[in-house]
Amino acid sequence: ACLVGSEMCIRDSKDTGWDLTTVLNAGFTGDLDAGSIGADGFTITDIMMYRSIAGTEKWEAVSEFKYDEEFNLYEYIDRYVQNGTDYMYALVPVANNVQGDMLKSDEVSVKYEGIFLTDKYDNKRLEFDIELGDITHNTGSAVMNPIDSVYPLIISNKTKYRSGTLSTLPLSKATLGLYGADIDSMAEQKNRDRWVDFLTNGKAKVLRMDNGTSILVYTANPIETHKEGRLRDLASLSFEYTEVGALNYQNMLKNDLIPEPILSRTTFNDDGGIING
């Protein structure tokens, strides 16, 4: 396992503490005869990936993908990790509905800075002039005024979710490349348009902050606020977000937030280093 920026990169390679011989030569050779469940006649069809907070042994599904015998390296980027948390990962070979044993990784420490909005295809970072705004902890309740009572009757339900606003100044790569000497006005407009399309696409996203916040949200109602004078081609974007569910595998699957693994075929040396691929 490795950490790429704020993204977890999981590889079934030897230097992570995963036994390459077990994973590739026994478990994933197309059948389970020499694999972890040792059941004659079973053929691997899928690979399940699980994640656990280190020390808890409470495993939750992260991804499930089809096994392809043409490839021996599966690279999966886990963008939905919580900052400041130590995780362990595990692969489980699946033969139809029969699961093999877990092949566990070493502990992986997650550390990143910033605020991110992430979906299956994009991982956008809020970088400049960030304003968190107010966060509302919403609960469901109604007030009734009975005729024969001095005091109202409060009826509440189990509704409990967060909502709020965020603001950031998105800058294009073109403007950043000018190092403050000028502003690429066309690049700025195109970059804001991409942000607005992302915020209004009607799809769920994961909001992650380096303070440990990690929630499943919908975003809406972006507002452009332009700077004044010579900076008028720059504009902050503020938007609303609403928590829409627990951050678990079923909700991630339902909202199409699970990315596909990157498949490749490579050759390893005895120490797990890549010879070619």
Image (cartoon, rainbow, N blue to C red):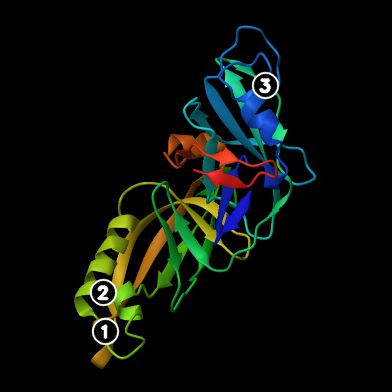
Secondary structure state at the residue bearing disc 2: helix
Secondary structure state at the residue bearing disc 1: loop
Q: Is residue 145 visible?
A: no
Q: Dots 1 and 2: beta carbons under 8 Å?
A: yes
Q: Could you say which disc has been placed on residue 188 in the image?
A: 2
Q: Amino acid at mark 1?
A: Ile
Q: CA distance from mark 1 to mark 2?
A: 8 Å
Q: Residue at x 50, y 25 (%)?
A: 69
Within 10 Å of the Cα at label 1, are there few (<14), some (14-19), or many (20+) other Cα atoms? many
Q: Could you say which disc has been placed on residue 92 in the image?
A: none
Q: Could you say which disc has been placed on residue 100 in the image?
A: 3
Question: Looking at the image, is mark 1 or mark 2 earlier in the sequence?
Answer: 1
Q: Nearer the viewer, residue 150 or 125?
A: 125
Looking at the image, the residue that sits furthest to the left is: 186
Looking at the image, the residue that sits furthest to the right is: 55
Position in image of residue 134 (x %, y %)? 50, 69
Question: Looking at the image, is mark 3 or mark 2 earlier in the sequence?
Answer: 3
Looking at the image, the residue that sits furthest to the top is: 41
